[in-house]
Amino acid sequence: MPFKRFVQTGRVAYISDGKYKGKLCAIVDVINQTRALVDGPESGVPRCGIRLNQLHLTKFRLRFPYTASTRVVKKAWKDDKLEEKWANSMWAKKVEAKKKRLALTDFDRFKLRHARSVRNKLRTSAFLYLKKQAKKEAASGAAAKKPEKKKAEGKKEKSKKVEKKK
């Protein structure tokens, strides 16, 4: 099945646009093909209709009956520990990182750029050191094997000379 997230009762969604941008809500009912009734009692989203193109569906789903009241949604939200699950998800971590980057000052961006530069220099020098060591080991291993090859070649040449004389 290609799709795993459906617009359905209990589906938790991230609001991407509008008055409640950046908050979580649960779909309580589907109004029509373009709108849904949502409720986010723990995140500060009141029960209201919202366009589906303003929602990003998450992998989380709450279990409550069709058109449940705010009280029931709140209980399901708490019982499922949705806030903890959301905080531990990669999506929430990326949203937080984006907020931090947007809040950086000019000096903070400079410090970050300098720290990355130092990190990359250390990483490059360590890589080049390891590469040099590997090259030395390969050269010493190849030097030990070369005389064996010469001996084998010498035997072949002697056998050819003996064949020519006959």
Image (cartoon, helix red, strand yellow):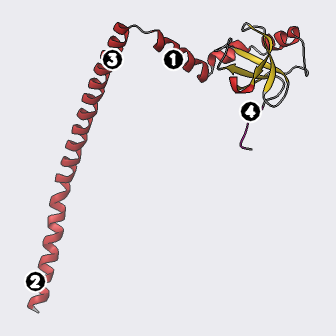
Q: CA distance from mark 1 to mark 2?
A: 77 Å
* Residue 161's disc number: 2
Q: Which residues are magenta?
A: 2-6
Q: Helix, strand, or loop for circle 4?
A: loop
Q: In the picture, residue 39 is in which quadrant?
A: top right
Q: Which residue is mark 4?
A: 5
Q: Name the residue located 51 percent from the left edge and 17 percent from the top edge.
A: 98
Residue 4 is one of the magenta-drawn residues: yes
Judged from the image, the secondary structure of the residue bearing numbered disc 2 is helix
* Mark 1 to mark 4 CA distance (whole Å): 24 Å
Percent of width and height locating residue 9:
84, 25
- Is 161 colored magenta in this rendering? no
Q: CA distance from mark 3 to mark 1?
A: 16 Å
Residue that extends furthest to the left in the rendered view of this protein: 165
Q: Please name the residue shown 15% across and 66% down the image.
A: 151
Inter-mark Cα distance, 4 to 3: 38 Å
Which amino acid, mark 1? Answer: Lys
In front here: 152 or 52? 52
Q: Nearer the viewer, mark 1 or mark 2?
A: 1
Q: Which residue is mark 3?
A: 113
**First along the sequence among labels 1 and 4:** 4
Does 146 sit left or right of 24 as displayed? left
How much space separates mark 4 and mark 2, taking CA atoms?
Answer: 79 Å
Question: Mark 1 highlights which residue?
Answer: 98
Helix or strand or loop: what does disc 1 sit on? helix
Residue 56 visible from this viewpoint: no
